[in-house]
């Protein structure tokens, strides 16, 4: 078991959090203009990066706020967290 630092609640057990997706890809500005194939690729086709990667997480078992977390995909260590849209600091959790 490891802890994740919620920007609002502080360090909490990882079991209180739910993964919410890749935070490295911006949502298309005009999704209605995408072809079905382009929308499919945006939703389902993912890179599989090794190392630090920004992800959306929700403190689903706590304050229910969304946040961005920088997670090392090779160790699962959460390197930093921040409210969505704010830069990820270097603070370790
Ligand atoms: Zn929280």
Image (cartoon, rainbow, N blue to C red):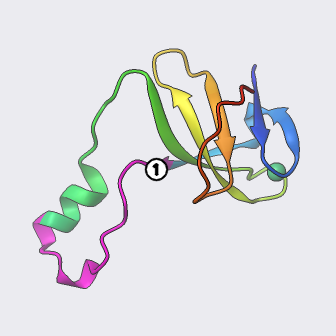
**56 over 37 or under it: above or below:** above
Q: Is residue 69 left or right of residue 14?
A: left
**Mark 1 sits on what residue?**
23
Write the residue at 71% across / 43% down: 17
Residue 20 lies in the magenta-colored region: no
| Residue 31, quarter of picture | bottom left
Q: Find out whether residue 28 is within the magenta segment.
A: yes
Q: Residues within 10 Å of mark 1 (few under 14, many from 20)?
A: some
Residue plotted at (84% across, 35% down): 12
Q: What is the quadrant of the N terminus in the image?
A: top right
Would residue 4 appear left or right of 62 to someone viewing this image?
left
Which is more toward the observer, 76 or 84? 84
> Which segment is the magenta one?
21-37
Residue displayed at 74% across by 59% down: 65
> Residue 46's x, y, as percent?
28, 43
| Residue 56 located left or right of residue 61 | left
Instruction: Give how far across and how far down residue 66 sits, in percent.
Output: 67, 57
Image quarter hosting the C terminus: top right
Residue ranking furthest to the bottom: 32
């Amino acid at each position: 078991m490891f802890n994740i630092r919620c920007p609002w609640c502080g360090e909490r057990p990882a079991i209180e959090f739910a993964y919410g997706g890749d935070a490295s890809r911006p949502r298309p500005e005009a999704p209605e203009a995408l072809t079905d194939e382009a929308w499919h690729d945006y939703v389902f086709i993912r890179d599989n990066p090794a190392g630090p990667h920004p992800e959306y997480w929700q403190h689903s078992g706590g304050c229910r706020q969304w946040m961005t977390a920088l997670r090392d995909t090779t160790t699962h260590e959460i390197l930093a967290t921040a409210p969505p849209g704010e830069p990820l600091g270097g603070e370790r959790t």
